[in-house]
Each structure stands twice: as C-alpha cells, then as structure tokens.
Amino acid sequence: MNATRLFASILTLALVSAALAQEDIRVRKATAAKTTLDLAGLTGPAGGASTVFRRTLESDLVRSGWFTFTRPGAYSVFGSYGESGGNVSAQCQVFGASRSAALLNKTYGQTAAEARRMAHQVADDIIMAVKNFKGIAAGRIAVLGTRTGSKELYVCDADGGGLRQLTADRSISLAPRWSPDGTRIAYTSFRRGYPDLYLIDLRTNNRTCIANYPGINMAGGFSPSGQDLLMVLSKDGNPEVYVKNLAGGRLTRLTNTPHAGEASPTWSPDGSQVAYVSDLAGPGSPQIYVMGLSGSGRRVTSRGRENVSPNWGPNGWIAYASRRGGLYAICMVNPQSQEDREVTAGDASYEDPCWASDGRHIVCTRQDGQTKRLYMLDTMGDPPLCLTPDSGGWSSPAWCAQ
Amino acid sequence: MTTRWVVSVTLACSMAAAMTGCKSWWSKKPTGTAGGGSDILPTGTESTQGDLKPRGDEFNGTNNVVAGQFDAVLFAFDGATVEDAERAKAEKVAEFLKANASDVVVCEGNCDERGSAEYNMSLGERRGLAVRAYLMSLGIDANRIQTKSYGKERPKDTGHTEAAWRVNRRVDFVVLKN
C-alpha cells in the first residue's frame, strides 16, 4: 500500500467515524428523554433564604433541560439546607440507582443574600454528577436595557435574576462582549459623543478606552484565550474586521472589502477562524462568512436575504438571526457540514443570539410589537423561557460561563 | 417658554443640590435597580490606552455645534451610495464649507430599524463615508469632514412604516463652528 492510498484509507476512516459520531448525536437528540431525579431526600425549612435556595435550585434543574422530578428517580438527591445567623448552608449528596457510592457529596455555605448563587452552584454540581458536563445555572448574562431612558449595560444571572445596572453613561451603549474568564466586558458607548470602544474590568470597575479611532469602534468577540479582541473599525475608510492583542496593543486587519461593510465578528471555539457579517454579496444582503486569520471569507448562509448576528458556539455551530418575512428567526448553521436549521417557531421576532456555554441553549432578544425581552431558547426542543421583565427594552445579550 | 423652563429646571436643581449637599446631582446613581448593586459605573478609574490616534476631539464640546442647518441626504433600503437626486443637498454643504473655511462638518449616518444594531452601525458609517467621499470630490479637505454612525439608534421618525423608514435612512449634517 503506497502512502497516498494509506492516507486515503485513514481519511475515509476518519470521515466514517465522524459520520458515526454525528449519527450518534442525532439518535440521542431524537430520544432526548429526560433523566428522572428524586429531590425528596433533600430537605430544609420553609421561609427566607431556605425557600429562595430551594426554589432556585428546582428552577435551575428544570431550566437545564435534562431532568424531570419523580419519586423514585434514576438519580436521588439527599441532604439538608437551612438558614442561620444570616448565612445559608447546604449539604448535598447525589446517588445513582445502585446507591453504592455518592456521585456528589459536598457542603455549601453563603451569606443569606447569596442564596440564589449558592443554588446555582449546587444545580451545576448535580448536573456534573449526573450528566458529566458543566451546567449553565451559574452563568451570567450582560445585556442592554433602556428603562432609564438611555441604553445602558446590565448584568444578570443565567435565569434573569440578580439584575443590576452596570453603566450610567446616559448615552447609547452597544455590542457588549464578555471575556471568557468573566473578568472584563467590552462594549461601545457614545458617552464622549462618538462610538468608542471601552473595556470594563469587573474586579475593579475601572474602565479603559481601547479604541477611539475616527469612525466606528465596535467590539467583536474575545478569543478563547481572552488575549485578543475582534473589532470592527472604519478608521481606514471602510468598516473592516480587526483583531487587537489586548496586552501588547498590536492591531491586525483581517478583512479588506472596500465596497462592503463588516459587522459582528465572532471566534470559532478553537480560535483558528472568525465568522462575521458582510454585505459583500450585494447591498441589502448581509450574510454570514467564515475566514481563517488570513485569507478571504467563505459564505456559510445560503437561505434568506438577510442573515446577521453570528455567534459561534462551543458545539461548533454558528447561531444567527435570519429575516423570514417580516420577522427574524434564530437559526444555526454548521460551517463544516453546511447543515442549517431554524430554532425558533415563527411566533415572534427573535434576534441577537448568543450560545450558552452548554452548547444546547441560546439566549436572545424576543420582540413582540415594541416589547423586547430576553429569552432562553432550547435547541433540543423545550419551550423558550423569558428571563426579563416585560418593560425595559432588553437586547444584545452576551453569555459568560463564570 | 423653553428658556423659562430651562431656567426653572436649573434653579430647582441648584436648590436640590444645595439641600442635599450633593456635589454633582446629575451623576447620582439611579435608584431602585434590581439587585441593589453598589457598583454602577463610574466608580473606578478611567483611562485611555496610549497608542490611539486622535480623532479631533478638539472640536468636541467647546465649539459651537449647529445641527439641522442642512437637509439630510436620504438612502435606498440598505443602500450606501449617494443617489443622484440627493447630491444637491451635499453640494450645499460643500458650498457652505468653502465659505466658512474654519468650520468642520460631521456626517452622521443613520439607518431604519430593520436589521441588527451592529450591522446597522456599519451601514450607517458607510453612508457617512459615502457622503464624506462626495464632499471630498467637491474639493473639501478630508480633515474637515468627520463621520459618526448612530446605526438604528436615533430614528428621526419613530414609526414603523415604509415612510418612517425612508426618512430614517439618512445622513445628517452637523457643523462644528471653530
């Protein structure tokens, strides 16, 4: 067997196993029955932080999409929780059907005010114990809201709780992007009159202007390492995609399209490619393109006149918003296989998708009439969940796993 | 009427500031935000990385800003080229700039509400740049023409009709008197 044929066989093998792996996922999806969980063995008093803890934990486990509560269940949670002296604590064990060894055995403690956060931690630990991957209950969301009369930056928990206002710029805030470690948020603000790009360090609340070139200064995504930030700048005469090394300050231009505009660049999970919006195909037809860190882009959306807001998820799929009739739908495309599917049901307009770190859920904006709220979509079929109040004009969510 | 209103608001504010002893009442944190976070910005420091090219902030704030002096240049749906029928509006601005040699103009690009906020920032900027290029072709120095995109954030008509969208796809001219 010569080298070429050997290589061909290896390639064939690789393709077959890739196809099998994919088939495997489809089978699991087609039978996405929920795991039964018995929570009756986890007990505590009613009232105060104890009730907040219990309700939040149950809600988180339901929101994860993986469980239904039954007695008995395939898995059982035992333990207790309670509040004393301004603190809330819990002790928690998880057992499988055999009851032989605890899959989780852990003690938790927080101030009573942090009962929700403690519940998020317990929920993610239970999910890890049963499903062996990280849940999203402890995730956070950066989001834009207009309830003060200006578009400001807010932060809330993965379930929409704990909402707090972060900026008071009294101008226009746009395009928040969260660093992978959760310590920094990049966003664009008109606070000094022009759309400049700022970086907020959440540990110190210090804010640094990192791009105030002539024209637009918009953030794209952070690289998986957190060291590089994609940007859209028009300083060289046209909106183009750039990448900036945040430590060294080096700025590299990635696109060169004098007759088209780019927007919303996002990294692939391994940091080797970038997906972005460009209207290269013609005025009025923004589409999603994928490129390496050099070279030119390859169009990955084929259906529809307007496809925008790409967000590359940890599962390799790019979520995006597609104009379908008068409404926007959230869709997801696999840039390798070109497989493309619609996630939303056409009951309202959905925009600004951002993957949650579990690769299953997508947080997005849902617009009914002029009401804009945050919704959590489930790509495996559970109904969408609303995360924010009806009023407040919520949009442009950015997910953080930490 | 307007002046009197401003005066009374200013008076009321001064009184409020005097009564509460609050140094800067206008930067007071909004109350009643969920979660009661005490860390609404700005509470930390503010800085700018040193390697940035100045944009011309010397024209910011201190000079006389004149908006609404010129008609907005309108654009086709998702278009970013100055149509023949709209050129006369830009030509008036060019004439003005030639007669007022120290003034600067900001071409403010705007879009209708359709499409993502981020794509519309790029589209609005391309509209501003298209008008800028046309002004340059009429002999105006590039240093005297700034661009600023508001994307879809500042509609002139807040309606949701074709007619509203038509007037929102525009470049406004703002003159900075120096």
Image (cartoon, coloured by chain):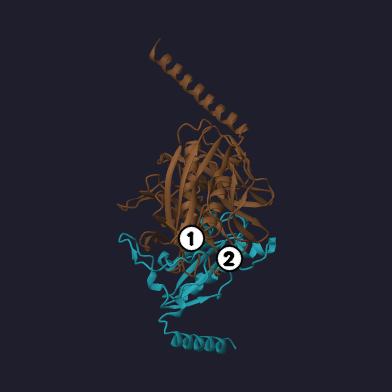
Q: x%, y% of residue B60?
A: 41, 73
Residue toward you, A354 or A182 = A182
The structure residue drawn at horizontal position 55% and vertical position 41%, both measured from the top left corner, is A360
Q: How many marks?
A: 2
Q: The N terminus of chain A lies in which quarter of the figure? A: top left
Up the image or down, A290 lies above or below B58; here it is above
Residue at mark 2: chain: B
Residue B85 occupies which quadrant of the picture?
bottom right
Q: Looking at the picture, do discs 2 and 1 lie on one chain?
A: yes
Chain identifier, colour cyan: B
- List the residue tagged with mark 2: B73
Position above or below: A326 against A382: below
Residue B168 is at least partly visible in this image: yes
Q: Which dot marks residue B133?
A: 1
Element under label 2? Answer: strand
Residue type marked 1: Ala
Q: Amino acid at mark 2?
A: Val
- Residue A252: image location, x then y, percent: 36, 48
Q: Quadrant of residue A102?
A: top left
Label 2 crowd (10 A; few <14 / some 14-19 / many >=20): many
Q: CA distance from mark 2 to mark 1?
A: 13 Å
Q: Position of residue B171 (x, y in %)?
A: 55, 65
Dots 2, 1 in contact, CB < 8 A: no
**Could you tell me which secondary element the residue under label 1 belongs to?**
helix
